[in-house]
Amino acid sequence: MNSCQKLGTFMKPSYRKMLQKSCCFHRSNAEETMAWSESVDTLLANKDGLAAFRTFLKSEFSEENVEFWLACEDFKKTKSSTKIASKAQKIYSDFIQAECSKEINIDFHTKTHISQNISEPNLSCFDDAQRLIYSLMAKDSFPRFLRSEAYKELAKKQQNGNQKKWFPFL
């Protein structure tokens, strides 16, 4: 039985199912898992933290925000001008365009500005929208993640596991 399966035995069935679908964030140690609560930046910078956060957002049907943020991070690293145009169009059609499958919730002004400039995109064309989505994640999704049973159970389990290393009688 791997550590995800062991952890799953302590969780409610709905969280156990969520854990089984994305079982890679169990590799972080207790310190890393607890560090995720420091800031959304710490969480997003940690591969396992990001995986746990994405799994949580999927369970709440709001993964488009982190997917958009990640797409923008990748987009900003693009060097080729032809790839800039194709990646910008892909981000636009996936996240910005009206009634697209992963439409993010941004204000009319920001959406209009992007729509007007998408024909000649540059590496900063999504910056305003990315800032808005980051702010939304930091103020809304991230605190909900930290209050979630999935995160609490994972942190508790890892703390207990860490204590057992120091106190084998626990």
Image: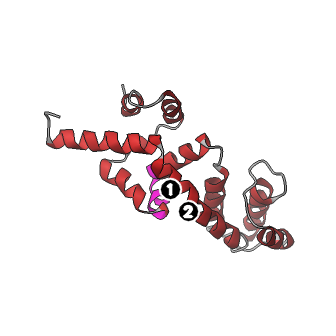
- Look at the magenta stretch and give its main secondary structure: helix
Answer left or right for 169 relative to 42: left
Say what amino acid the circle numbered 1 marks: Pro
Give the left or right position of residue 122, taking residue 24 as reference. right
When asked about the image quadrant of residue 76, the answer is bottom right
> Height in image: 115 above or below 53?
below
For the magenta stretch, what is the residue range? Answer: 41-49
The count of marks equals 2
Residue visible at 38% across and 30% down in the picture: 10
* Magenta run includes residue 42: yes
73 in magenta: no
Specify few, some or many for label 1: CA neighbours under 10 Å numbering under 14, 14-19, or 20 or more.
some
> 122 or 153: nearer the eye?
153
Looking at the rendered structure, the secondary structure element under dot 2 is helix
Q: Position of residue 33 (x, y in %)?
A: 37, 50
Q: Position of residue 68 (x, y in %)?
A: 66, 57
The residue indicated by pointer 1 is 143
Task: Return the residue found at the far top.
Answer: 1
Q: Are marks 2 and 1 in contact (CB under 8 Å)?
A: yes
Q: Is residue 20 above or below residue 118?
A: above
Q: Can the viewer see residue 78 in this picture?
A: no
Nearer to us in this view, 93 or 10: 10
> Which disc number belongs to residue 157?
none
Residue 139 marker: 2
From this view, report whether residue 107 is shown above or below residue 94. below
Where in the figure is residue 123, as x and y percent of width and height? Answer: 69, 73
Q: Position of residue 113 (x, y in %)?
A: 81, 73
Q: CA distance from mark 2 to mark 1?
A: 7 Å
Q: Amino acid at mark 2?
A: Lys
Residue 166 visible in the snapshot: yes
Q: Secondary structure at mark 1?
A: helix
